[in-house]
């Protein structure tokens, strides 16, 4: 058995075990029962296995990558739909489709984040081989692969969270008013900026893109008093980008020092 296959099996088994643990502990609490629903626990195990499977590297060819991603999402969506039905999280097929659409949004967000990092690593390799031109002005081309991620994070995600709040009929929009702007948005922006900085150095257009993409959400979901939310994505994005660039510079200096040693 190849080493890659072994690693993949280990990831799947670890994810399944974690899903089983979550299902046994979490399901009774949700359904207010001392006994767990077998199908709900099975769905948790399946979702854990899919999460472990998602950690494998991307396929070499675009066609294989597309087929693997589509197959993985279909399996993930099936297990998630089973969990939604067993926990009575939705009423009817429309409710299930609503939760599946949110899953698709989250899936795209994670997939684009991974794909962006992979794409930039390939671009760096091409540059080392002399197959890629130098940096563009303000590194706009280097920043461009992160734009879909920014659009999902700053536009699609808050709209999806607001949809959850309306579907639940909550009086206080805690997801879009507290959890998203004060936790999800700055943390995700910082991580994305760090990823970009580690691969491409300082890219000044990235925090600007975060600011501009979130600006319509201020007036669509809130009002002008929430304009500071834009800075809660732009500033962490800039900080992460600078930290990533510093890390890249220090690593380059360290590697150069090793090469100079006899």
Image (tube, rainbow, N blue to C red):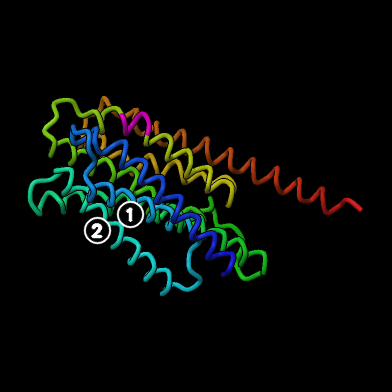
Q: Which is more toward the observer, 136 or 14?
A: 14
* Residue 249 appears left or right of 188: right
Element carrying mark 1: helix
The x and y percentages for residue 165 are 17, 35
The x and y percentages for residue 223 are 22, 29
Q: Is residue 26 above or below residue 206?
A: above
- Verify whether residue 70 appears in magenta: no
Mark before the other along the chain sequence, 2 or 1: 1
Q: Is residue 244 above or below residue 144?
A: above
Q: Which is more toward the observer, 84 or 118?
A: 84
Quadrant of the image occupied by residue 128: bottom right
Q: Quadrant of the N terminus?
A: bottom right
Query: Which mark is on residue 242?
Result: none
Q: Residue at x 33, y 67 (%)?
A: 71
- Verify whether residue 182 appears in magenta: yes
How far, Cα to Cα, is label 2 from label 1?
Answer: 9 Å
Nearest to the eye among marks 2 and 1: give it.
1
Check whether the beta carbons of the residues at disc 2 and disc 1 lie within 8 A of each other: yes
* Residue 115 appears left or right of 136: left
Element carrying mark 2: helix
Q: Residue at x 37, y 54 (%)?
A: 148
Q: Residue furthest front?
A: 35
The x and y percentages for residue 235 are 46, 33
Query: Which mark is on residue 78?
Result: 2
Give neighbour class at mark 1: few <14, some 14-19, many 20+ (Cα, 10 Å): many
Q: Residue at x 66, y 69 (%)?
A: 130
Task: Give the residues drawn in magenta, as a range.
Answer: 179-183
What secondary structure do most residues of the magenta stretch adopt? helix
Residue corresponding to mark 1: 46
Q: Is residue 90 above or below residue 171?
A: below
């Amino acid at each position: 058995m190849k080493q890659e296959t072994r690693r993949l099996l280990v990831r799947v088994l670890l994810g399944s075990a974690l899903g089983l643990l979550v299902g046994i502990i979490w399901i009774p609490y949700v359904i207010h029962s001392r006994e767990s629903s077998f199908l709900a626990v099975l769905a948790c195990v399946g979702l854990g296995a899919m999460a472990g499977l998602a950690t494998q590297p991307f396929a070499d060819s675009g066609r294989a990558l597309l087929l693997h991603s589509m197959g993985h999402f279909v399996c993930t969506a099936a297990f998630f739909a089973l969990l939604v039905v067993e926990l009575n999280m939705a009423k009817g097929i429309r409710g299930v489709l609503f939760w599946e659409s949110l899953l698709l949004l989250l899936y795209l967000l994670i997939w684009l984040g991974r794909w962006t990092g992979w794409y930039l690593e390939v671009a760096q390799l091409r540059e080392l081989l002399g197959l890629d031109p130098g940096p563009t002005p303000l590194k706009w081309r280097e920043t461009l692969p992160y734009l879909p991620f920014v659009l999902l994070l700053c536009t699609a995600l808050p709209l999806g969270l607001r949809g959850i709040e309306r579907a639940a009929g909550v009086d206080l929009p805690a997801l879009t008013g507290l959890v998203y702007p004060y936790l999800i948005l700055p943390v995700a922006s910082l991580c994305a900026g760090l990823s970009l900085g580690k691969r491409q150095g300082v890219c000044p257009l990235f925090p600007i893109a975060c600011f501009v993409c979130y600006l319509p959400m201020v007036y669509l979901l809130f009002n002008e008093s929430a304009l500071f939310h834009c800075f809660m994505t732009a500033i962490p994005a800039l900080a992460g980008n600078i930290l990533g660039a510093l890390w890249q510079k220090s690593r380059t200096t360290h590697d150069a020092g090793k090469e100079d040693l006899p």
